[in-house]
Amino acid sequence: MSPTPAILVEFYRETNGNEPVRKWLKSLDKEIKVIIGEDISKVQFRWPLGMPLVRSLGGGLHEVRSTIPNGIARVIFKVIQGKMVLLHGFIKKTQKPPAQDLELAKERAKKYEEKERDV
């Protein structure tokens, strides 16, 4: 019998159907996709988790911190109604998450929550 995930994973979807995090993941090398995928899976099955794999960014946002061969990858997510909603992914080049990446994730979380309320 396979283990039950602690939370479900869902990709944020724009109104036009695009899933930015899925698209970003598909653009990466296979080796990097595997590392990030395994890290997301660890969070999915062991939630709640903390450092070093998951860091809180405040406001309910968290980041999955993946060490990849050419640096560090981040996937920003928020747990909404029992789902780990993947909001934004990027390769990190600075110590702090860039403000624009954080703002984009916040905006997407807000849109997702508004859509969920309307359903």
Image (cartoon, rainbow, N blue to C red):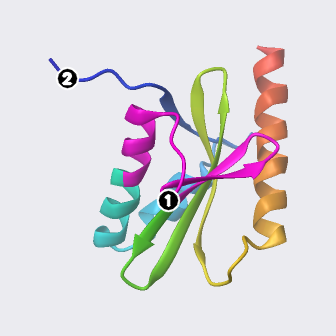
Q: Nearer the viewer, mark 1 or mark 2?
A: 1
Amino acid type at mark 2: Ser
Amino acid type at mark 1: Pro
Image-based side of 103 in relation to 32, left or right: right
The residue that appears at 75% across and 53% down in the rendered structure is 105
Instruction: Please state, as top left, top right, bottom left or bottom right, where the N terminus lies in the image.
Output: top left
Instruction: Please state, as top left, top right, bottom left or bottom right, where the C terminus lies in the image.
Output: top right
Q: Let me know if residue 59 is in the magenta part.
A: yes
The residue segment tinted magenta is: 39-64
Residue beneath label 1, please? 52
The residue that appears at 72% across and 46% down in the rendered structure is 61
Residue count near mark 1 (Cα–Cα under 10 Å), binned few <14, some 14–19, many ≥20: few
Residue beneath label 2, please? 2
Tell me where residue 103 appears, x and y as whole percent: 84, 59
**Vertical placement of residue 19 versus 85, above or below:** below
The residue that appears at 84% across and 38% down in the rendered structure is 110
**Vertical placement of residue 52 versus 73, above or below:** above
The residue that appears at 59% across and 22% down in the rendered structure is 82
Q: Are marks 1 and 2 in contact (CB under 8 Å)?
A: no
Label 2's element?
A: loop
Residue count near mark 2 (Cα–Cα under 10 Å), binned few <14, some 14–19, many ≥20: few
Tell me where residue 25 appears, x and y as whole percent: 46, 61
Tell me where residue 97 appears, x and y as whole percent: 72, 70
**Vertical placement of residue 90 versus 84, above or below:** below
Distance between the alpha carbons at the discs numbered 1 and 2: 26 Å
Looking at the image, the residue that sits furthest to the front is 51
Tell me where residue 51 appears, x and y as whole percent: 53, 55
Looking at the image, the residue that sits furthest to the top is 119
Image-based side of 7 in relation to 106, left or right: left
Image-based side of 102 in relation to 29, left or right: right
